[in-house]
Image (cartoon, rainbow, N blue to C red):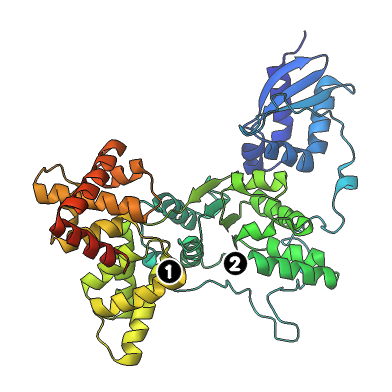
Amino acid sequence: MKKNHVEVWDNCLSVIKDNIHYQSFKTWFEPISPLKLDNNVLTIQVPSQFFYEWLEEHYISLLKKTITKELGSDGRLEYSIIMDSSTTNKEPYSIKVPTSNRKDTKNPAVAMPIDLNKGKSRDIPNPFIIPGLKKIKVQSQLVDSYSFERFIEGDCNRLARSAGYAVAENPGRTSFNPLYLYSNVGLGKTHLAHAIGLQVKNNFPNLTVLYVSTEQFMAQYIESVRNNNQNDFVHFYQMIDVLIVDDIQFLAGKEKTQDVFFHVFNYLHQKSKQIIISSDKAPVEMKGMEPRLLSRFKWGLAADLQIPDLETRIAILQKRIYSDGIDVPYEVIEYLAYSVTTNVRELEGALISIMAQSSLNKKAINLDLAHQMIDKFVKSTSKEISIDYIQKAVCDYFNLPVDIINSKTRKREIVQARQLAMYFSKKHTKSSLATIGMHCGNKDHATVLHACRTVNNLVETDKQFRVYVEELDKKIKL
């Protein structure tokens, strides 16, 4: 009786299941679907290029034996890979079994992982220890102040924070492996990465957690090549339970270091160890990275951290002030939050500058001091004026609450304030008319254009209104 593709693959699975660990079977074989059996060639579909590479690297011998058992010596296996949407190649990637000898294609500089649980253990050098000093236990390199308690959650980072906390509660056992955090500079990805590591240490004291910058990793690898102990370098990293690698974008163009990191990544992922990576770019925007490494970055969850909104910026400042045990008037906090919108690092830097000026010169922290410091700080950081800041300046000038400017009321003074906010937003920001309208009461671009024309007409015909505009312009550019 002629066998069909489903029956043949089921028979293969029954053999494979008896020869590998149950968790490995669930991870690497249950997701596979048999597609067809034609002329003794069984075609199976795998979820990604990553899957194909892993099967070929770790289970080629087992697959060859099971296919031969089911289909005879002339039996062959082909893979149909579900390609990424970014590729234009629609043909399934196929390869025959038997393949070339895998041992011949391995990088000789990276040996197979040693089994640390069998036989007599040996002392593996710790790349974080300076030669000549006493060898100590692996230090996590985590910063205690970068905890979840000090990480302010908002709409800008909620997904990343939630995923990070889930990882900390169950490292290596969630679908967020690796957890890839990305954002522009100063938006909290390093803080969040440390927070995850600290929480893991609290929850699982026996796990080895390590934070390392990509620059450190590269320097250690170069040193291992110089000392001819690359294998020890790799084995050290394979002992880590939770590996946090910061600023992975610096690996771009470093082919040898990428190859070593690739092997470390594969080993840790196979052993269900947690990997956390941070970058200033999304995986799809990374240049100079090997495709096989990028495919692994996409294996888990990629979560971005965006620029915090006004409420989150105020909360960040309040948290910092509370932690430092100082007293800062709310109007100063609000002014800072409106003035510095680029990133959290600059926001906290502005606050530290004000506190330092107050302490050194024995001045009270007030709005005048904030104006002086922000003026210097803004010039040194080339800050762009934001729509939020303009709205705040206009409302303060006319003694109106900020939220009323975005309401539907048609009172003359409020409509005029809204039109001025639109006018100055067009003048002082690079935002589109549609964006300005959305921030000013969810209006369309035509309303913004009308507001700008109205303000220009009033400036030419109304002396008092011209005074308003000139004074506001100076206030906004302070």
Q: Quadrant of the N terminus?
A: top right
Residue that carries the numbered disc 2 in the rendered image? 210
Asked which quadrant contains residue 131, the reply is bottom right
Specify few, some or many for label 1: CA neighbours under 10 Å numbering under 14, 14-19, or 20 or more: some
State the image coordinates of residue 432 (x, y, percent, origin top left): 38, 44
Q: Please name the amino acid that badge 1 sits on.
A: Glu
Q: Tell me if residue 282 comes above or below residue 361 in the rendering.
A: above
Q: Label 1's element?
A: helix
**Marking on residue 346:** 1
Q: Tell me if residue 261 comes above or below residue 297 in the rendering.
A: below
**Would residue 218 be found to the left or right of residue 30 on screen?**
right
Residue sitting farthest toward the front: 461
Q: Residue at x 29, y 47 (%)?
A: 439
State the image coordinates of residue 236 (x, y, percent, origin top left): 71, 66
**Is residue 273 something that shows in the picture?**
yes
The residue closer to the viewer here, 307 or 105, is 307
Q: Label 2's element?
A: strand
Say if mark 2 contacts mark 1, CB within 8 Å: no
State the image coordinates of residue 38 (x, y, percent, origin top left): 78, 14
Q: Residue at x 76, y 73 (%)?
A: 123
**Is residue 146 something that shows in the picture?**
no
Q: Please name the amino acid that badge 2 sits on.
A: Leu
**Would residue 212 be found to the left or right of residue 96 on screen?**
left
The residue closer to the viewer here, 161 or 24, is 161
Q: CA distance from mark 2 to mark 1?
A: 27 Å
State the image coordinates of residue 407 (x, y, percent, origin top left): 16, 45
**Marking on residue 262:** none
Q: Quadrant of the C terminus?
A: bottom left
